[in-house]
Image (cartoon, helix red, strand yellow):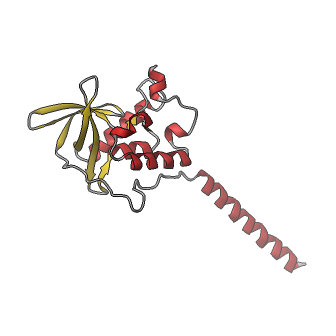
């Protein structure tokens, strides 16, 4: 009888440990994987990180920069971020600001074209001591704080990487993929 009682106590302890492990695993926050490129694909070469961000990001996909007296308003290629009045709009802007801060206020630009508002449309890169050079568009999308903008993918040399980042965010249900959010282009209509 003592032997049976001891086994029941041991079994109860094992079940309790499994239950706690299940709760911890369920509540653990899943972080997105590092942004990368598919095997066999050429990783685009980042431009020099030589532009200074002159104003805090207004939203999650627009910044103002200067270099040697030249000033540009930059609209991010490849992505569209929630508008400030939309859910996650301020979070998107604040995350972009934190990325720029992590690169000491400096960015690199691969200007692709100008848009109808006179803004330069560009891929934007940062360089951080922890991770090196990274494409800001992919970092915004992998956190679910911007959408890969399918309509303009032909103007996006790094489309494959940005789209892969979005697929990861979707799978993990991060940010805009965690609920029923309206895309910014639909919101603007």
User: Residue 23, relative to residue 61: is it above or below?
Assistant: below
Q: Nearer the viewer, residue 109 or 174?
A: 109
Q: Give me the residue at 16% from left, 45% from top.
A: 50
Position of residue 81 relative to residue 48, above or below, is above
Occupied quadrant, residue 59: top left
Query: Which image quadrant: the N terminus?
Result: bottom right
Query: In the image as oriented, which residue stretches furthest toward the right?
Result: 1
Residue reaching furthest bottom? Answer: 3
Question: Residue 84, image x and y in percent?
Answer: 41, 26
Q: Seen in the image, is 89 located left or right of residue 61? A: right
Q: Is residue 137 above or below residue 45?
A: above
Q: Residue at x 28, y 42 (%)?
A: 124
Camera-side residue of 182 and 117: 117
Residue 112, picture quadrant: top left
Provide residue 148's location: percent of width, then percent of height. Answer: 43, 39
Q: Position of residue 108 (x, y in %)?
A: 22, 45
Q: How many marks?
A: 0
- Residue 138 location in percent, x, y? 38, 46
Q: Residue at x 65, y 55 (%)?
A: 23
């Amino acid at each position: 009888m003592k032997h049976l009682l001891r086994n029941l106590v041991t079994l109860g302890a094992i079940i309790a440990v499994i239950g706690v492990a299940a709760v911890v695993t369920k509540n653990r926050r899943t972080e997105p994987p590092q942004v990368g490129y598919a095997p066999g694909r050429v990783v685009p070469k980042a431009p020099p990180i030589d532009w200074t961000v002159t104003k805090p990001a207004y939203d999650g996909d627009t910044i103002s920069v200067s270099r040697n007296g030249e000033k540009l308003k930059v609209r991010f290629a490849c992505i569209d971020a929630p508008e400030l009045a939309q859910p996650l709009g301020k979070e998107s802007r604040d995350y972009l600001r934190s990325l720029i801060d992590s690169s000491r206020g400096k960015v690199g630009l691969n200007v692709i074209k100008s848009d109808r508002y006179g803004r330069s449309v560009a891929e934007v890169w940062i360089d951080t001591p922890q991770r090196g050079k990274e494409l800001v568009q992919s970092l915004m999308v992998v956190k679910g704080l911007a959408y890969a903008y399918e309509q303009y993918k032909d103007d996006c040399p790094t489309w494959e990487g940005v789209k892969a980042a979005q697929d990861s965010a979707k799978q993990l249900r991060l940010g805009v993929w965690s609920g029923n959010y309206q895309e910014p282009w639909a919101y603007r209509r």
